[in-house]
Image (spheres, rainbow, N blue to C red):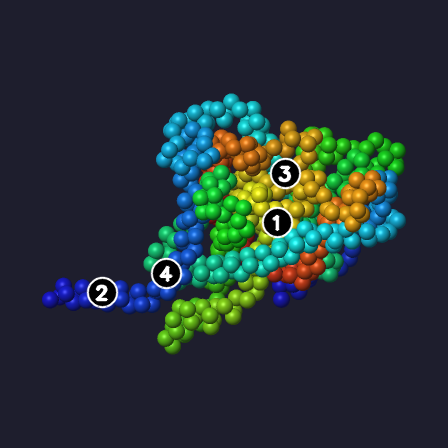
Amino acid sequence: MEKTKRKKHYKKRITFGDVVIIAVMLILAALCVLPLLNVIATSLSSPGAIMRREITIFPVEFHTGAYADILGDARFLRSMVWTAILTVIVVVVNLVMTVLAAYPLTYSSLKGRKYIMIYFIFTMMFGAGLIPGFILNRDLGLLNNPLVLIIPGSLSIFNLIIMRNFFMGIPESLKESAEIDGASPMTILFKIFVPLSLPSFATIGLWVAVGRWNGFQDALFFLPAASEYHPIQLLLWNILQQNTTVDVADPGGLSAMPVGWGRVVENASIVVAMIPILCVYPFIQKYFVKGATLGAVKG
Amino acid sequence: MENTLTKNKKAGYWRGYWSRHWSLYAMLLLPVVFIFIFRYVPMVHLYRGFAVNNTIAPLRDLEFVGLDNFRNAFTNQIFINAIRNTLLFSALDLLLGFPAPIILALLLNELKFERFKKITQSISYVPNFISWVIVGGLATTLFSTHIGAVNGFIESWGFEAIPFLEREGHWIISNVLISIWRGVGWSSIIYLAAITNISPELYEAAEIDGASRLRKMWHITLPGIRPVIATLFTLALGGIMAAELDRFVALENSFVRGVSEVIPIFVWRWGLQANQFALATVIGIFQGIIGMIMLLSGNWFVKKMGGAGFW
């Protein structure tokens, strides 16, 4: 309804201003897409073409050898699979924790609700920082322990606030009529709130998933001696910083390969690490957008 | 007798309250304990900022040294550089990065073709979902002097290559612009949402008065989203002493260490890796307090200006 109203006040005539705006938008869209195309093209080109800087958005001297190298590198594959498993676990743990915290706080009859909220929100404003966190993890035996990628981040107060806002949007009357029927809070949660909140679970879950897939700080800090548990982004960072190299299929190793081959492999590993996000992005976009406005307007 | 009656009533009330609410408290138990252990317990270790530097010994064995660590910190050139770099990037982010999504939202709002607008928006969100590590890789592939496609272009036109990432001054600008590239589309969502809440009647009235498009933007759209701008500006002020570690770790290289070392990198490199726990804790305390002061004063200011504020 609002859309038709808005449309009405724009005249359909295209003015000079429209042309300028459309041009700016086209440039912006190109700026977003071209770097990705360039990196894909680079990963499919020959080392010589890279050194001569001939690559724009089309591969030069096309070949897929770099991908063969990456897919042949057991460490890279294992890291991808491990990060995928890790992401699923982290999403489930986060959703459970968020619901456990958010649902009781929607009850206005809950005594102490205000103080519990303050208790949670204060940690958003002031945190102890890296060193105290490091010492805590060390004391708890989480150092070089893969659980450090799951437990310390298992509840985000920001997500808690968003989830609570979602829950508060569910009509009070539904809850009241269930209460009159003698339903306990647990029953109400599973019979009413959970089924009605699936889109919000999707939003928060996807948010957590992208954060986990793209995150590497915690592994960098807390898994210095457990590289077998490094998530894909940390492995990729180490490859890009040339702290480590992908095992190339050639028996002579990287040194026997043509100059610039490392560059091709680097770009191929960027593409492989990026693919999961780019593949699911079109389908999940709407959930992200919903979450972004909700969290920011009320949070 | 009356007394026992009210007592019974009270006891009955509490029994009823508890029987209806115990499961809610049971649910809260796990998150509350979790937050206590992982967010509040570490605060005990802030004491290390006031004690002799020791990475292993338990707190009770540490000798109290008062503000010595703070004094050392503020005479330490690396520490001061980290603060300077953080403030430099925060200032540039506020100056260039903060208005960018507002301008984008205004432009998107002026697009007449719904489909084109939707597609542009969707594309503009994509960089936000690409990790900083990958963005760092993209930056090298595009902008490095030796293999970068952009410099290949520039040289093929007969100009000299630009050291986008290899010179400190250039790197600062590149870093800020790349950060805008990554975040501008995503950050515009909230402003666009606010714009759709502005009453269409205002625009119609302005049109009858013959207002131009720019005048409508300036006099209707911008004032309409002012509360959102104020809120987000306050949040940005609160983060003035903070920096995203990922961004600087992913983009830095050995040529630009002098300007890339922001507070989180300092804490990681000099605190964690070089075992300067006391010094790194000091900078954490400093950062936390400044952040809180900025947030509180920003909130006060927004309220003073007639905005909503957070509390």
Residue A114 appears in view: yes
The chain identifier of the residue carrying mark 3 reads: B
Of helix, strand and loop, which one carries label 1? Answer: helix
Q: Find residue A95 and report its horizontal and vertical position in percent.
A: 51, 60
Hey, what amino acid is under mark 3? Phe
| Alpha carbon distance from label 4 to label 1 | 39 Å
**In the drawing, what numbered circle is on residue A228?**
1
Hey, what amino acid is under mark 4? Tyr
Of helix, strand and loop, which one carries label 4? Answer: helix
Hey, what amino acid is under mark 2? Ala
Please say if the residues under marks 4 and 1 sit with CB atoms less than 8 Å apart.
no
The chain identifier of the residue carrying mark 2 reads: B
Q: Which residue is mark 4?
A: B25
Of helix, strand and loop, which one carries label 2? Answer: helix
Q: Residues within 10 Å of mark 4 (few under 14, many from 20)?
A: some
| Alpha carbon distance from label 3 to label 1 | 25 Å
Q: With respect to residue B160, does B12 lie above or below?
A: below
Question: Which label sits in the foreground, 1 or 2?
Answer: 1
Q: Residues within 10 Å of mark 1 (few under 14, many from 20)?
A: some
Question: Which label sits in the foreground, 4 or 2?
Answer: 4
Q: Earlier in the sequence, mark 3 or mark 4?
A: 4
Badge 4 and badge 2 both on one subunit = yes
Question: Which label sits in the foreground, 3 or 2?
Answer: 3
Residue B112 appears in view: no
Name the residue at the left extreme. Answer: B1
* B45 or A116: nearer the viewer: B45
Quadrant in the picture for residue B78: top right
**In the drawing, what numbered circle is on residue B11?**
2
Q: With respect to residue A20, does B169 lie above or below?
A: above
Q: Residues within 10 Å of mark 2 (few under 14, many from 20)?
A: few
